[in-house]
Image: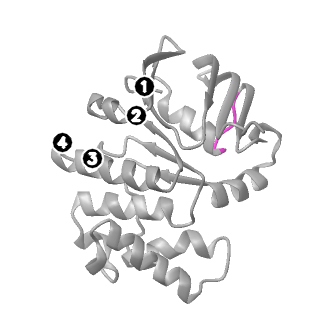
Amino acid sequence: MINKPAVEFSQLSKYYQESGQQQLIFEHLNLSVAAGEFIVLLGRSGSGKSTLLNLISGIDQPSSGDIWANGVNLCELSEHHRTLFRRHHIGFVFQAYNLISTLTVAENLLLPLELIKPIGDNDRDKVSDLLAQLGLADRLDTYPDRLSGGEQQRVAIARALIHDPDIVLADEPTGNLDLETGEQVIALLDKLVRDAGKTLIMATHSHEVIGQADRVFAINNKALQLVTDTL
C-alpha cells in the first residue's frame, strides 16, 4: 500500500488584482511532500512564501491548479469545510506570535481545542505536558506581555501543536527573534515535530535552518527550485 503524500500541489498558480492589473505571485508550482518530512522554503520578501503557506492551509485559494493535504483536495472544499479541516489537521506558527493578550498562556493553548471539542482534564494535562517540554512549565498562568519574545514564540509553537495536527506550517518563526533565540526555537520546533512524526513546512529568509531540513526549496522568478535534498 502506497501512502498518500502529506501535502501535494499540481500546476499551482496565484495572482492578485492590484490597481486593475494582474499581479502574478508564482505559477505552475509542483511538489509532493511525504508525511514526516521537513521542508524549508527560501525566498526574498514578497516572493510568495507566505502566500504558498496560506494556500496549503486553506486560508487562501489558488488562481489555478490543485492542492491536496492528507489526500483531500482543498480546492474542492467550501470555505467552511476548509476551516474545519484546518482546525483538525493543520498547525500554524506565525512570525507575529498572535497570542491573545487577555488570556493566560494556558488559555491561549486551550483555545484551539475549544474550537473542535469540549475541554476536559486530559486537555489541561496535555497543555501542562507540552509547556514542560518547551521549558515553560512555570508559565501556565502568565499573560503574554510578561513573556520574552522567545518565550512567546515557544507558546505559539505549543498552540500550533496542541490539537495534534498532521501538518505544521511555520511562517518566518524566527523573524522577530535574535539569532541565538531563533536557533533555539527552531531546534525545539524541529524536535517536537520529528518526535511526533509530523510534516513541517517552514518559510524563512534565514539560511541557518537549511542544515536541519530534509529538502530546501527557493521561490525564484515565480518558480519553485530545489536547493538541497538530503533524503
Q: Which mark is residue 176?
A: 3
Question: Three-letter amino acid code at disc 4?
Answer: Leu
Say few, some or many: other residues with alpha carbon within 10 Å of mark 3 (under 14 / 14 to 19 / 20 or more): some
Q: In this view, does 23 lie above or below 134?
A: above
Residue 217, above or below 69: above
Say which mark, if any, is on residue 230.
Answer: 1
Q: How far apart are marks 2 and 1 (CA)?
A: 8 Å
- The rendered magenta stretch, by its main secondary structure, is classed as loop
| Residue 213 badge | 2
Please name the residue shown 24% across and 57% down the image: 150
Task: Say which of marks 3 and 1 sits in front.
Answer: 1
SS at badge 3: loop
User: Pointer 2 and pointer 1: residues touching (CB < 8 Å)?
Assistant: yes
For disc 4, the marked residue is 179
Inspect the image, locate mark 3, and give the three-letter code of the amino acid beneath it: Asn
Q: Mark 1–mark 4 contact, CB under 8 Å?
A: no
Q: Earlier in the sequence, mark 3 or mark 2?
A: 3
Q: Can residue 102 be seen in this view?
A: no
Spot occupied by residue 198 in the image (x, y as percentages of width and height): 54, 50
Front residue of this view, candidates 184 and 3: 3
Q: Give the range drawn in magenta.
A: 58-62
Q: Nearer the viewer, residue 199 or 49?
A: 199
